[in-house]
Amino acid sequence: MADPRPIGVFDSGVGGLTVARALMDLLPDEQIVYLGDTARGPYGPLPQPTVRDYTRQDVDWLITRDVKMVVAACNTATAAALEVDPLRFDRPVVGVIEPAVETAIRATRSRRVGVIGTEGTITSRSYDRAVARIGGEATKLFSQACPRFVTLVEEGRTTDPEVLEVARAYLAPLVAAQVDTLILGCTHYPLLTGVISYVMGPDVVLVSSAETCARSVFAQLIDHRLLAHHAGSTPGTVDHRFASTGDPATFARLARRFLGPRLSDSEVLAASDVATSS
Ligand code: DGL
């Protein structure tokens, strides 16, 4: 049985589009309904009870869109709501923390793992609890809040000298702690993979919570028999829906940075002469 209903994805703003993008890559036949709470985000600096309330409202909005699964594509929301008081909902709800921790625990050799995220995510200690639960006491977690990273990414700044300087300052304690695996515990950080990897060094494995979440969604769709496409059917053109609680034009402008360049048909040249050109 195929289930054509969309997957609901929400975030405090545009950051969760890194998760949506990973989902589109892994699951091209799935329709996504994306909600970005740009009017009330960012969630990182907000008190936990406020984030919990907003998260419940975001999930409720998605449920009214008849989604088959909800993806909390926001570390701060996952930390404040899902990890503390799992939402009662008759369909699967997938967050970003557990899948990232499971991957990090498998990747680490030294059992010294780092995590970086917003103030809200780090102070909630949700990653600490997940590491203790999944990795046991033998795994040591070193946490660092990196709030400036969010504004830098939203300003489109991922390579300039100030970004490198900020990254060096934030990551110095994790370099000193000699972690061999670092969880990018915030939706925005995959866009800073270059500078984070440069500062941490090539031996440190970076775990993107966006990618690991997408892999978990893939597995859960199969396990719950919720895939949209099944063998023998013809995949159609998927029409994703994006909604923003704030100004749609601002959302669209920032969204392009996170969703990546999407080619339009007219930009693709016909290279019919390749076989005859040598
Ligand atoms: N989406 C948030 C997260 O992954 C980052 C932006 C915010 O502070 O809301 O934690």
Image (cartoon, helix red, strand yellow):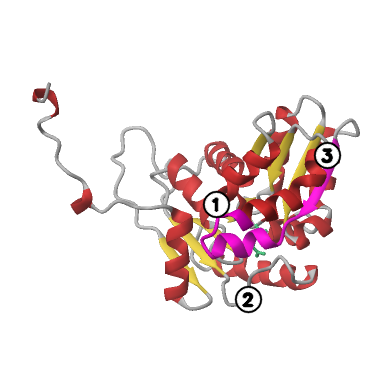
Q: Position of residue 93 (x, y in %)?
A: 63, 52
- Residue found farthest to the front: 161
From the image, state whether disc 2 or disc 3 is nearer to you.
3
Residue 99's place in the image compared with 246, above or below, is above
- Say what secondary structure mark 2 lies in: loop
246 or 71: nearer the viewer: 246
Q: Residues within 10 Å of mark 1 (few under 14, many from 20)?
A: some
| Pick the front one: 51 or 149 | 149
When asked about the image quadrant of residue 183, the answer is: top right
Q: Residue at x 79, y 55 (%)?
A: 122
Residue under pointer 2:
40
- Residue at which label 3 appears: 176
Q: What residue type is disc 1 on?
A: Thr
Q: Quadrant of the N terminus?
A: top left
Q: CA distance from mark 1 to mark 2?
A: 28 Å
* Residue visible at 11% across and 25% down in the picture: 277
Query: Dot 1 corresponds to which residue?
Result: 159
Callout 3 amino acid: Ala
Looking at mark 1, is its residue's CB closer than 8 Å to ligand 1? no
Q: Is residue 175 magenta?
A: no
Image: magenta residue range: 140-162
Looking at the image, which residue is at 41% across and 50% down?
A: 4
Q: Position of residue 126 (x, y in %)?
A: 80, 52
Residue nearest the observer in this picture, 221 or 147: 147
Residue at 63% in and 76% down: 40
Q: Residues within 10 Å of mark 2 (few under 14, many from 20)?
A: some
Query: Foreground residue, 160 or 151?
Result: 160
